[in-house]
Image (cartoon, grey):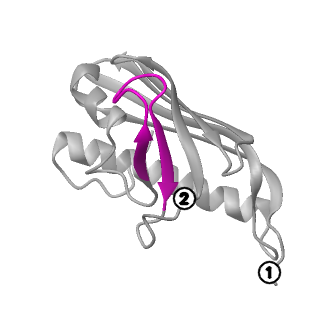
Amino acid sequence: MTEPLATIDFLTHSKVHIAAGAAAIWPHIVDSDGWRRGQLLTPLGGPTGSVGQRFHAASPEAPDVALYYVENAELVPAQRRTIRLDTLDGTFMGFATWELTPAGDGTMVAYDVYSRGPMLPPGQSAEDLLAWAQQMMDEGLVRLKGFIEGKDLGSEVA
């Protein structure tokens, strides 16, 4: 029998400047297929591309096995998308928000996650897990930047 995961506050904050307008970036915030790696979001129902659309998050290795649920909680076109995160039993875990802000010749894209839940494996420190998660979130925005701008950017995060 495996030990349960310890409950932690899972907080990350990432930003990247993208040389494109918010209107060009927005469709990739609403539908992250194509640039986002890691967990997949599989639609479960609700109005497509609208508040109330639901998904389950899964790993690419087991796309049919839900890890947790996601629901569009707020959509302000070309400005902000907030998703609600819930455990499989429906317990509220938190929110994640993409924010698009005009910045000079492009857009500053921020991605902030505020959640709490059983996420820490036995033997791993919360600091190590959060440092790894922060790196993954930063790299995700760099992939979005490269996808939009059409170039490979390594790990250039604001």
Amino acid type shown at disc 2: Ala
Between 38 and 84, the one lying in front of the other is 84
**Picture layout, residue 95 above or below residue 135:** above
The quadrant in which the C terminus is found is top left
Instruction: Tell me where the magenta segment starts and ends, as one range.
Output: 41-58
Residue 19 spot, x, y in % from top left? 24, 30
The label number, if any, that marks residue 77 in the structure image: none
Task: Decide if residue 120 is on the left or right side of residue 16.
Answer: right
Residue at 70%, 43% in the rendered image = 90
The label number, if any, that marks residue 2 in the structure image: 1
Q: Are marks 2 and 1 in contact (CB under 8 Å)?
A: no
As for residue 2 lying within the magenta part, the answer is: no
Residue at 43%, 30% in the rendered image = 46
Residue 29 spot, x, y in % from top left? 35, 34
The quadrant in which the N terminus is found is bottom right
Between 11 and 158, the one lying in front of the other is 11
Q: Which residue is mark 2?
A: 66
